[in-house]
Amino acid sequence: RLAAEAEAKAKEEAEKTPAEVKPAEEVVTPAEEIKAKEKEKEKEKIKGKGKGKEKALKEEPPKKGAEKRRMREVKEELYFEEVMVEEEVSPAAERGKKLPPAAGREELHVDSSKARRKKKPQKAAVAAQAGKPLHGFEKPTAPIIYEVAIPETLTVAELAQKMSIKAAEVIKTMMSMGSMVTINQILDQETAALVVEELGHKVKLLKEDAIEEELGLEEEIKGDQVNRAPAVSVMGHVDHGKTSLLDYIRKTKVAAGEAGGITQHIGAYHVKTDKGMITFLDTPGHAAFTAMRARGAKATDIVVLVVAADDGVMPQTKEAVQHAKAAGVPIVVAVNKIDKPEANPDRVKQELVAEEVVPEDWGGDTQFIPVSAHTGEGIDELLEAILLQSEMLELTAVKDAPGRGVIIESRLDKGRGPVATVLVQSGTLRKGDVLLAGQEYGRVRALLDENGLAVEEAGPSIPVEVLGLSGSPSAGDDAVVVADERKAREVALFRQGKFRDVKLKRQQEAKLENMFTQMAEGELATLNIVLKTDVQGTLEALTDALTKLSNQEVEVKIVASGVGGINESDVNLAMASNAIMIGFNVRADAVAKRIIEEEGVDLHYYSVIYDAIEEVKQALTGMLAPEYKEEIIGLAEVRDVFRSPKFGAVAGCMVVEGVVKRNNPIRVLRDNVVIYEGELESLRRFKDDVQEVKSGFECGIGVKNYNDVKVGDHIEVYEQVKVTRTL
């Protein structure tokens, strides 16, 4: 029956005309009805615009309130329909299904003709699909093995950095090896090598000076050799006329401007003569400048030994001969002051022969030239002798190469900073070069000749002043032009670290020595000094001369020293260490002066080295413990002994020698043997107390706490006399 009904229904549908069939899309929903009404209203408004506002308003439908209510009801129906749909269909069950057009608002549905929005790919799926991490780093299949360069010493942190691991890993490894360490602990080379091997890396042991060997400082410079001017060091005893001789050669007046008439710095000059160019180094003759003279001998090719014909060979003359021989430098002797009536050149020859300096006319190989710096006699002969000696030495150097030389002197200039005098020995030093000098380095900002004029370059045997270094290098340091500033800094810092280690070690040893000596001998009297000088060489000489004044009782301690003016930190240090301040050819700045005046710091200025040494010596003399000397002032012979209820045994004496004074120390002698030492308590002449009794008079002597005086004994009276001590 059901099948027959369904078939009949199907026939009816088929018989219907196409006009009677209402298409699905013509089914009007409430939302479409509202939209249609709004469109009609807009059309009516547009029609009514031309006829005026009043006509348009008349044409509007009269029932506004009913229409609004109808609209509100439709919206509510729509809202309830949506809620009902959401409740009936769960999102999980119906995800991806399209709702029929009648259910819900039209704008909420995706058009069936449009493609569905693609799902966002999941990260896990991408990682699994690619098989590679997103950051592009692939974990190595085998561990990386480094070649670790290990210096003499390094910290745990530095070692970890070299192996590209955390310091905690190194500490953990060392703990497993039985060592407890901290991150900043310093390891020796052997321990560090064991740790590196334990962690599976290769070890490369560095030699201490490997960093310097990389610079190739020891390598010979290759290139075309050219003849160079001789570098001549002028040496001799103080006041024998070295600077005056050079003044005559250079036609200058340096000697006239020197403090105390003595040279206290190394002066470097180059002089053009008719026969060729000569570079001179003028060295000090004073005993304190031993190190400076030794440097002068090493840096030069020929030593001109100046000896005064009226004075002969003196201690510093002998020392200069020793320096020249130690450096293997030939000597030319200039016998100066031959214009004086008392000049005796033959005496000079005889005295120098004793020092193994034999003149040519006596069968030796040393040229002796009689000269006078005052009249100029023999100067040309001296220059010829120097040039002849240089020809025999065949002095050559490579000019077209990086410059190398030696630091002759250095100082700290207030306006220009550290200034170093460099004697170029080979190659060419140019403005803009990176120079490594001892523990200092820097780019050469300016080159100045001895007259203060700027030059662009300096070839072999030319002395120049260099500006631009990081600090004042020590006199005698090698100066080398380096291609790379970074490398120069690295070597300079390495040298500074090495110097610091040596200094700390020395200080530690000194502390221990001081502790033991003070325990053995009691406390030393110490004179603390803060020393500032104008140049490095003078600083070295003064430090050496002052520390040599120390002995077993008093000690000179240089608390701080440096090149340059006295500043605030120097004064503060002097106050903290209770030191005296010495400024040699330097002055205190304004801030330092104010503190010195306020705090009453003991500051002394000097320009002559003798004066500085002499005054420090006097200060040390005042610190010496006073020495007392016994002086016998009287002798009395005991003639009788009687008893006194107040003083006990009283000796009746005759004063044989000198004076017997009351309250002076005495000795009782029996048969010339001291049997008692004590004090004279009472001195009477008859019944009167007296202060002293002279020779030839009788007196009564009461000896304090001693009653065993006998007839025939001698009483010796003496006093302690304070003796001034000297160093």
Image (cartoon, rainbow, N blue to C red):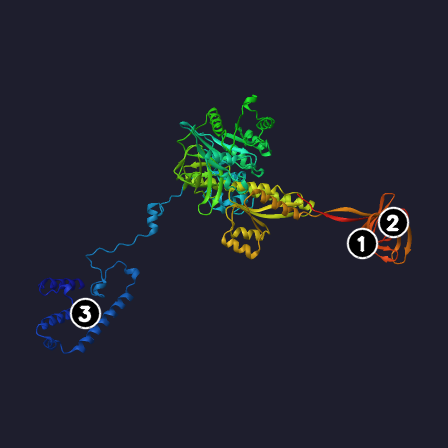
Say what secondary structure mark 1 lies in.
loop
Question: Residue 225: x percent and y percent?
Answer: 41, 27
Q: Is residue 121 left or right of residue 225?
A: left
Mark earlier in primary sequence (1, 2): 2
- Name the residue carrying label 2: 654
**Residue occupied by mark 1:** 663
Residue 178 in view, yes or no: no
As drawn, is 177 to the left or to the right of 270? Answer: right
Residue 384: x percent and y percent? 47, 27
The location of residue 74, given as percent across then percent down, is: 21, 72
Which secondary structure, mark 3?
helix
Tell me where residue 671 sits by quadrant. top right
The residue closer to the viewer here, 66 or 59, is: 59
Q: Is residue 453 left or right of residue 551?
A: left
Calculate the distance from the C-alpha at mark 1 to the C-alpha at mark 2.
Answer: 18 Å
Query: Disc 2 residue type?
Result: Met
Residue drawn at the location 24% of the way across and 56% of the way down: 116
Report the residue marked by disc 3: 30
Callout 3, which amino acid?
Pro
339 or 687, which lies in front? 339
Disc 3 residue crowd, few under 14, some 14–19, many 20+, Cα 10 Å:
some
Hey, which quadrant is residue 466 in on the image?
top left
Of the residues under marks 1 and 3, which one precedes in the sequence?
3
- Mark 2 surroundings: few (<14), some (14-19) or many (≥20) residues within 10 A: many
Confirm whether residue 294 shows in the render.
yes
The reply to whether dot 2 and dot 3 touch (C-beta < 8 Å) is no
Disc 1 to disc 3, C-alpha distance = 143 Å
When the figure is inspected, residue 242 is found, relative to residue 28, above or below; the finding is above
Q: Which mark is residue 485?
A: none
Q: Are marks 1 and 2 in contact (CB under 8 Å)?
A: no
